[in-house]
Structures are given as C-alpha cells and as structure tokens.
Amino acid sequence: MSDNGEDKKSLGEGAGPGAADEIRLPVDEHIEEELSANGGKVRARGVYLLPNLITTGALFSGFYAIVAGMGGNFEAAAIAIFAAMILDGLDGRVARLTDTQSAFGVQYDSLSDMVSFGLAPALVVFSWALGPLGKFGWAAAFLYAACAALRLARFNTQVDTVDKGIFIGLASPTAAAIVASMVWAGHNADVGLGLAIVAALVTAAAGLLMVSNFRYTSFKTLDVKGRVPFVMMLAVILAFSLVTIDPPRVLLGLAVIYTLSGPALWLWRVRRAGGTESELHK
C-alpha cells in the first residue's frame, strides 16, 4: 500500500491536476487491439491464448535448434527446425478456424519466424560446416539471416496487396528446410573444405532466393476441407511413405524441387514471351 501511494505521489508532484491519472507505469500497460464486432469497431484487451501458444512452440523449437547446434547435436537441431515449420503452419490455420486472428498474433508470428527460419538455420549451418571457412563462412551465414529478415519485412508490407496464391521470393520456411535438411543429411559426415564450400554456396543461394522476385505457389488457395478423389489420399500416403524411407534426403529433394520451380517458371515465361520485357512483368 505504501509503495503504491508513494509512486502516485511522486508522479503527481508538480505535474498539475489529473497528472497521476494520465501517467501510467509500464506494469499497468495493457495490450489493446481494435477488432470488428457486429459491424462496428471495438477495443479489446489481452491476447488470444491458443494460436499464440502454438507460435511460442515454434519459437521454442527455433531456440532449441540454436542451442543444439552450438552443442554439436546437428541432427536434433535440424529436426527442431522442421518442428518449427509444422507449428508455424498450424498457428495461422488454428487462428482462422477459431476466429482468433489478431494484429498481435501476426507480429508475434513474424518475430518467431525470424528466429526459427532466419537465425536458427544460419547459426546451425555455421556451427556444422561454415566455421572453418573463416570470414567467408560467417559472411554466408549472415547473408542468409539478413535476407530472411528482409524477406519477412517485405512480406509483411505486401501481405494485403499481393495475390495470396503466390509468394514473391522463396518463403523463409522453405529456405530453412533446404539448409536444415542439408545439415540433417550430413550431420555424421566429415566436413572438409569441399563440403564446407558447397554448404556456404547453398546457404547464400537460399538467402538470395528469399529476396528475389521469383514467384512460388503458396498452396494457400488449396481447399483442404473440400472433397477430393480417392486417388489423392493414396498420393498423400505414398508421399509419407517416401519421407519415412530417408527423411533428411527426401525432404532435401522436395525442398530443392520446390525451390527450383521459381526460376524454372520464370524461364518458361521468358521463352513463352519471347524475351520481351513488357510480357515478363505481366
């Protein structure tokens, strides 16, 4: 009681009438968001628990990947990054299904992505193979991390203006999948100069593709609630079976195929348009 009284007294001294009501300590601040309700705008305090809890799980997975990579447990680090991808794909869908979307959740998810798909892959691959390359190694790792930050910033500014069916530039989870699956596939290998250079080039290329203008399908327009032919279920089962045969190499192959689809589509458009600049920007 005395502490609160002293705080209010000190805040109000010399500040005029009503100053104590206008100045609030940081501990008294609350998160408020403007939400739509019954056709009007209302202000709501607090945050939604379920989607942000899933986002926290993704953030923890990215943090654990960094710690595991620093400790030399590269297999666990790579698996943790893939776990973050699964959780990152769930939080947004859960928020939409439960109608718990919020601006706070969007920003929190973006910060979590920076840790899980920007810093974690860069630091894990540096600990695995890029360290012996010296400045070239840490430059490649930093390039990847910086490009991930730029990719997320560009995505946040274009989210309301770009077609939701495509990504402009390689998505950060896919870039992280390339780096993580490469580390996972070679976690038991003796990393020599040749493998280290290949890892640096792959890391730098994944980073640059994130800030490129290549277009990738986002699969966000895929209707997962509608009916599909029975053969589609067989295809999904086959895909899971292939992954279980050799998870790191199969996942690496899938990530590389998807990554190459952007430049391949661009080249196809170039050939179809006859190389005319006006057609390429349609």
Image: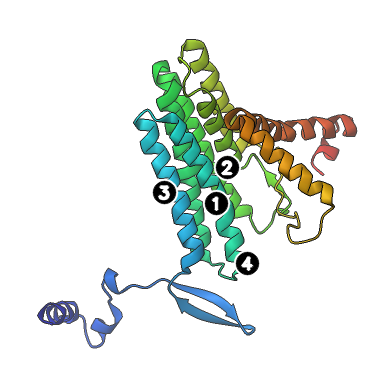
In the rendered image, is residue 205 in sight?
yes
- Mark 1 touches mark 3? (CB < 8 Å): no
Q: Earlier in the sequence, mark 1 or mark 2?
A: 1
Q: What is the C-alpha distance between the residues marked 1 and 3?
A: 11 Å
Q: Earlier in the sequence, mark 4 or mark 2?
A: 4
**Vertically, is 71 above or below 149?**
above
Identify the amino acid type marked 2.
Pro
Q: What is the C-alpha distance between the residues marked 3 and 2?
A: 15 Å
- Mark 4 touches mark 3? (CB < 8 Å): no
In this view, which residue lies farthest toward the top? 193
Identify the amino acid type marked 1.
Asp
In this view, which residue lies farthest toward the bottom? 17
- Mark 1 touches mark 2? (CB < 8 Å): yes
> Which residue is pictured at 56% across the width and 21% down the height?
201
Q: How many marks?
A: 4
**Vertically, is 248 above or below 234?**
above
Q: Badge 4: few (under 14), some or many (20 or more) residues near its Cα, within 10 Å?
A: few
Q: Earlier in the sequence, mark 1 or mark 3?
A: 3
Residue tagged by mark 2?
Answer: 173
Task: Please identify, in this view, whether the residue under mark 4 or under mark 2 is nearer the observer.
Answer: 4
Please, what secondary structure does the residue beneath circle 4 have?
helix
Q: Earlier in the sequence, mark 4 or mark 3?
A: 3
Residue tagged by mark 4?
Answer: 97
Identify the amino acid type marked 4.
Leu
Please, what secondary structure does the residue beneath circle 3 have?
helix
Give the image quarter of residue 98. Answer: bottom right
Q: Is residue 210 left or right of residue 28?
A: right
Please, what secondary structure does the residue beneath circle 2 have?
helix
Task: Please identify, in this view, whether the residue under mark 3 or under mark 2 is nearer the observer.
Answer: 3
Residue tagged by mark 3?
Answer: 60
Q: Badge 2: few (under 14), some or many (20 or more) residues near its Cα, within 10 Å?
A: many
Q: Badge 1: few (under 14), some or many (20 or more) residues near its Cα, within 10 Å?
A: many
